């Protein structure tokens, strides 16, 4: 059964969907009612087992929402995103440089009983982006990139913060002083936080062959080809290399997968790779 939430939506809406509970689902996407920059925000719809709810805003703060990541932890949906900390329409000059200092990371916990989100924000200095969320058995971590500038210019770091049921801890540096970090992933296993990142190693953002994947501060392999788009499945790390999706036990033989266009799933206990063929 196809459900149309809304037509004529934002072109880069990046819809995501998760399942949880007994047949429940949650969808999140970006949209805007007008062309005002501050109107771009996150919307959601909740399937309670019988019907989808009318689309509503995740968080009504009248400031821009970007880069959402939707996941399920302890059978509860969470969304984490890059959240503007001020309105931009009233800036004297609207440029990437003027908006750069005004982004933090926000996390929304979905409350099925009310069909709404409980939202909290991790305050931090600098340009915070590309957030991920992970955890288990009450532990909840946010992991994100803190960059000196847009598009990989300058140095980049990876930060993390833990939620203690009432507030987020002061962000800690997991990795610092690196060149561009093009993508990250996060995992929580055996009581410990793990993260992976695709890192530019030569300082030239115009080249890509030198990008390598790190996990917990160490490079995972030297395949001689670019390594990008890290992803965890059942606590195992995978990444994209040589048109293929590999792990530490696999050779990066040439495949047919388009760059970054893959997803790993578990279906009936089996690991499944869904991809776009190049």
Image (cartoon, rainbow, N blue to C red):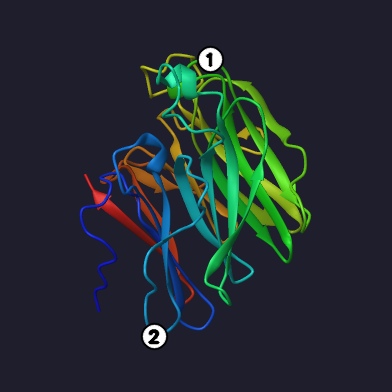
Residue 10 numbered tag = none
Residue 50 numbered tag = 2
- Residue in the foreground of this view, choosing between 71 and 254: 71
Q: Position of residue 58 (x, y in %)?
A: 49, 57
Q: Position of residue 129 (x, y in %)?
A: 53, 35
- The residue positioned 73% from the left and 66% from the top of the image is 137
User: In which image quadrant can residue 45 be found?
Assistant: bottom left
Q: Residue furthest front?
A: 90
User: In which image quadrant can residue 52 be found?
Assistant: bottom left
Q: Is residue 64 above or below residue 150?
A: below
Residue 154 numbered tag = 1
Q: Position of residue 143 (x, y in %)?
A: 62, 42
Q: Is label 2 or label 1 in front?
A: 2
Q: Is residue 151 above or below residue 197?
A: above
Query: Are there few (<14), some (14-19), or many (20+) residues within 10 Å of tag 2?
Result: few
Q: Earlier along the polypeptide chain: callout 2 or callout 1?
A: 2
Query: Are there few (<14), some (14-19), or many (20+) residues within 10 Å of tag 1?
Result: some
- The residue positioned 54% from the left and 66% from the top of the image is 116
* Distance from Cα at disc 2 to Cα at disc 1: 50 Å
Can see residue 248? no
- Residue in the foreground of this view, choosing between 86 and 150: 86
Quick check: 218 left or right of 84?
right
- The residue positioned 46% from the left and 32% from the top of the image is 223
Q: In the structure shown, which secondary structural element does the residue marked by tag 2 occupy?
A: loop
- The residue positioned 24% from the left and 74% from the top of the image is 2
Q: Position of residue 278 (x, y in %)?
A: 21, 44
On the rendered image, what quadrant is the N terminus found in?
A: bottom left
Quick check: 109 left or right of 59?
right
Q: Is residue 168 above or below residue 178?
A: below
Q: In the structure shown, which secondary structural element does the residue marked by tag 1 occupy?
A: loop
């Amino acid at each position: 059964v196809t459900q149309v939430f809304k037509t004529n939506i934002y072109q880069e809406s990046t819809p995501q969907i998760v399942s949880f509970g007994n047949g429940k689902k949650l969808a999140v996407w970006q949209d805007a009612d007008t062309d005002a920059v501050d109107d771009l925000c996150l919307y959601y719809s909740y399937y309670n087992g019988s019907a989808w709810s009318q689309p509503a805003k995740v968080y009504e703060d009248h400031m821009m929402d970007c880069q959402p990541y939707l996941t399920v932890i302890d059978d509860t949906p969470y969304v984490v995103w890059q959240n503007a900390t001020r309105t931009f329409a009233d800036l004297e000059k609207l440029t990437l440089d003027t908006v750069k200092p005004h982004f933090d990371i926000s996390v929304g916990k979905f409350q099925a009983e009310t069909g709404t989100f409980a939202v909290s924000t991790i305050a931090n200095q600098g340009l915070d982006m590309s957030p991920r969320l992970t955890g288990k058995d009450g532990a909840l971590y946010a992991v994100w990139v803190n960059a000196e500038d847009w598009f990989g210019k300058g140095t980049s770091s990876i930060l993390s913060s833990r939620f203690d049921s009432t507030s987020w801890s002061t962000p800690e540096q997991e990795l610092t002083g690196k060149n561009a970090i093009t993508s990250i992933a996060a995992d929580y296993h055996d009581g410990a936080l793990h993260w992976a990142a695709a890192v530019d190693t030569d300082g030239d953002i115009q080249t890509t062959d030198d990008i390598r994947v790190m996990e917990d501060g160490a490079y995972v392999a030297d395949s001689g080809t670019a390594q990008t788009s890290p992803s965890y499945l059942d606590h195992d790390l995978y990444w994209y290399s040589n048109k293929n999706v590999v792990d530490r036990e696999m050779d990066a033989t040439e495949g047919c997968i388009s760059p970054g266009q893959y997803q790993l799933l578990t279906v009936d206990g089996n690991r499944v790779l869904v991809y776009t063929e190049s």
